[in-house]
Amino acid sequence: MQTPKVSRPMFPKGYVDKPVSFLDWEWVTEQMTSSENYWISSVRPDGRPHVVPRWGAFMDNKLYYDGSPGTRHSRNIIGNPHVSLHLESGYKVVIMEGISRPADKPSPEFAERLSKAMTKKYADQGYSPEPNQWDEGGLYVFTPRQCLAWTTFYENPTKFTFEEE
């Protein structure tokens, strides 16, 4: 994935009138990599929103997470892959929009990296996936299209956008 374009989000007058800095993508990457919980919002077939926390690993500028194909979230993204994702903090904010889809069977090398990343984060919660866990499916990949992020809302709100692949 290419480096994102950096700009300022659009806000109504009076919200962020004199920002002083931008965040860099490395800061967002660190937040995404270190987070344990990712909140993903999808849309039900009747248009109602559905939000669910997921465990995952942010690798190569994408979030990889797993789950049963029978879950509401998984069924939603088959019909409409456009989702929003955010982290838990309301102070160190990362909000992404993008596409979430079932991932192809990972290569043995990537499955090993993913297994190690997930085990490092979630072993104390009782989750240590084996590299072959996703051979038959159940792995999803979220690809960001845009991201809003800030550490101090009125000082450094930053918008990152990605070109379509």
Image (spheres, helix red, strand yellow):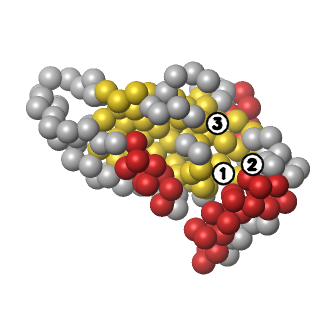
Q: Residue 155, labelled with which disc?
A: none
**Residue at screen point 69% across, 59% down:** 113
The x, y position of residue 13, in whole percent, is 15, 23
Look at mark 3 in the image and give the residue it sits on. Answer: 100
Q: Secondary structure at mark 2?
A: strand
Q: Secondary structure at mark 3?
A: strand
Q: CA distance from mark 2 to mark 1?
A: 6 Å
Look at mark 2 in the image and give the residue it sits on. Answer: 139
Q: Secondary structure at mark 1?
A: strand
Looking at the picture, which amino acid does disc 1 mark? Tyr
Task: Please rate how many residues cluster around mark 3, counting C-alpha atoms within 10 Å: few if below 14, some from 14 to 19, many from 20.
Answer: many
Q: Is residue 67 visible?
A: no
Camera-side residue of 38 and 73: 38
The x, y position of residue 2, in whole percent, is 53, 32
Looking at the picture, which amino acid does disc 3 mark? Ser
Looking at the picture, which amino acid does disc 2 mark? Leu
**Residue at screen point 70% across, 36% down:** 101
Look at mark 1 in the image and give the residue it sits on. Answer: 65
Q: Are marks 1 and 3 in contact (CB under 8 Å)?
A: no
